[in-house]
Amino acid sequence: MRRYLGQRLLFAGVSLLGLTVLVFVFLRAVPGDAVAQVLGESAGSSPQQVAELRHTLHLDDPLPVQYVRWIGDLLHGDMGRSIFTGHTVIYEIRERIGATFELAILALLFSVLFGLPLGVVSAMAGNAIVRQVVRITSILGLALPNFWIGTMVIVFGVRWFGWAPPTQYRSITDHPLQNLEQFIIPALVVGVGLAASLSRMTRSTVLEVRREDYIRTAFAKGLKDKSILMRHILRTSMIPVVTLFAIQVGIVVAGAVVIENVFSLPGSGRLILDSISKKDYPLVEGVILLYGIFIIFVNLLTDLVYCLLDPRVRLA
Amino acid sequence: MAAVVYDEITTLRGRRRRSSLGAWVRKQPVTIASLGIMIVFFGVAVFANQLAPYGPNQPTSAYFHPPSPSFPFGTDNLGRDILSRVMYGARTSLIAGVLSVSIGTLVGALIGMLAGYIGGVVDIIIQRLVDVLMSLPGILLALVVAAGLGASLVNVSFAIALALLPVSARIARGSTLSVKVAPYIESARAVGASWLRIVFRYILPNAAAPILVIGSVQLGFAILAEASLSYLGLGIPLGTPSWGNMLSGSALLYIQRAPWVGVAPGVALTLVVLAANLIGDAARDSLDPRLRGAA
């Protein structure tokens, strides 16, 4: 167990290091940098000013030097500063992460609320037509483009219900009700795909467990259907479902990036896109790295939980 | 319910024995319909030049024209016919989808097989590289790569391929490991077959079925990813119609006034992705039940 844990931690560290290289290389591969845009705001900049600013931002160093400096700073807990606002990257992220977090939690909540029961029904329903309908509904949920549903909700919400997403951000601490009103629809939109994927995966694990010999034995013993479902099938099916959580977190993060842009929510996903268009490297790199750390951590955690729940994994 | 379980077990066994094409078609009406949808969209994509009433960027006389017999899906703020743009958009979407899935699964399968066959340090290095690609959700990884490479059809496809690659690499590695120790591989080695020949002649056929299945499962994701990136302005440049970028940029400013601009591309996108997912799902269930549930 300790050896397994050590190996996992090492791998997680290697992944993280690899991610920093990947993000760094691809983002700085774009020709041009933020300097022109920064100076563009204060008109009348000479080539000398450009060179000066580039020098202060260390953008004139060779890429490997920039990379090593960035990693060195990261190891000291310094993620750098935004080129545009001058705030630290950590400050910028802290301002924005709350909205993303709230969106993610609500979406995951919807996903569990709808996805789990749907998955169980599509695996267990006696009626073949019901099973097919649920199967196609959940595959449809996976096929619906979230940016399109979001746009359609905004367009037709106004036309049919006179509902428009609030334009001004309300924080959850100051205006809890308006905040919820603002987040519930985007969270539902993200939740569609999530619930669909959760129901698909629940379906397949339930189907697998249902074919086990001990389930047949339970039926043969004459146990009540309900007790077989709750005590034998669902309980065993939930073990693999735990690992699905890691996949869900990935989907929700990706979904948030898109949906925050559709609904103009001031979260970290919008921060990424705004910073990409401004070539504000430290900020993009910071947010992406944070996502990466989070996902690697969740993966590590699910591996460990799985390993605790299922001793066979440990021995393998 | 007990009866249902047994019915299913017996039909499952029955289905395995009876493998004629006709029986399969009768059992899979949904899959057949999905194949039909895919064929229609591929046809539209190939023959967009002939089928579309207008060019993709050709202004007609009418601006913001609602759907009508002459413009079935309406026109946009520049007077372009939405139907024609959706047709040319099919071309963009399907090229991006097929290109990225081909690159992703081919390269993934290749490095997965090498990792599994050579083993040792090579295996460890390849696996860690795959881990790196998996440390971001697919769309986000593609977003970062596409942002770096710049917006174009080829770059976006490459970015998506990079996000797809880890899945087929893992599966190819797994099936390679499972056949590597088989006696026929050993005998091939004994008669002096080169490792290249062993990989391509003996291991590849064994890994091919699950990789094809994964490819068909990934097609829907790839098409959706291209549309999402284009929607965010990091995918296909606005000059080329794509179902994603038809909802972004200036279209978004006028969408309250002309909602039909956004309806048709979204419906087309949903239909194609739904059909692709249903086909992938059926392929997964029939070709390799073990893969069920793998994302």
Image (cartoon, grey):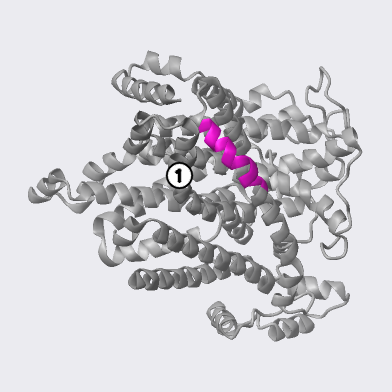
At which x and y percent is residue B69? 81, 17
Q: Chain of mark 1?
A: A
- Secondary structure beneath label 1: helix
Q: Residue A274: in sight, yes or no?
A: no
- Determine whether A12 is above or below B44 in the image: below
* Quarter of the rendering containing residue B241: top right
Q: Residues within 10 Å of mark 1 (few under 14, many from 20)?
A: many
Q: Tell me, yes or no, whether the highlighted magenta stretch contains residue B191.
A: no
At which x and y percent is residue B124? 33, 65
Given residues A309 and A68, the one toward you in this image is: A309
What residue lies at 60% left-to-right and 60% top-to-bottom?
B144
The N terminus of chain A: image quadrant:
bottom left
At which x and y percent is residue A17? 49, 73
Given residues A40 and A11, the one toward you in this image is: A11
At which x and y percent is residue B151? 65, 53
Q: Residue B127: in sight, yes or no?
A: yes
Given residues A309 and B129, the one toward you in this image is: A309
The C terminus of chain A: image quadrant:
bottom left
From the image, tell me which residue sits under label 1: A237
What residue lies at 34% left-to-right and 38% top-to-bottom?
A214
* Quarter of the rendering containing residue B41: top right
Dominant secondary structure (helix, strand or loop) of the stretch shown in magenta: helix
Given residues A55 and A203, the one toward you in this image is: A203
- Determine whether A39 is above or below A163 in the image: below
Residue A172 left/right relative to A217: right
What residue lies at 59% left-to-right and 59% top-to-bottom?
B149
Q: Amino acid at mark 1?
A: Ser
What residue lies at 49% left-to-right and 31% top-to-bottom?
A124
Q: Tell me, yes or no, whether the highlighted magenta stretch contains residue A111.
A: yes
Looking at the image, how many numbered discs can be counted on the residues?
1
Q: Which residues are magenta?
A: A110-123
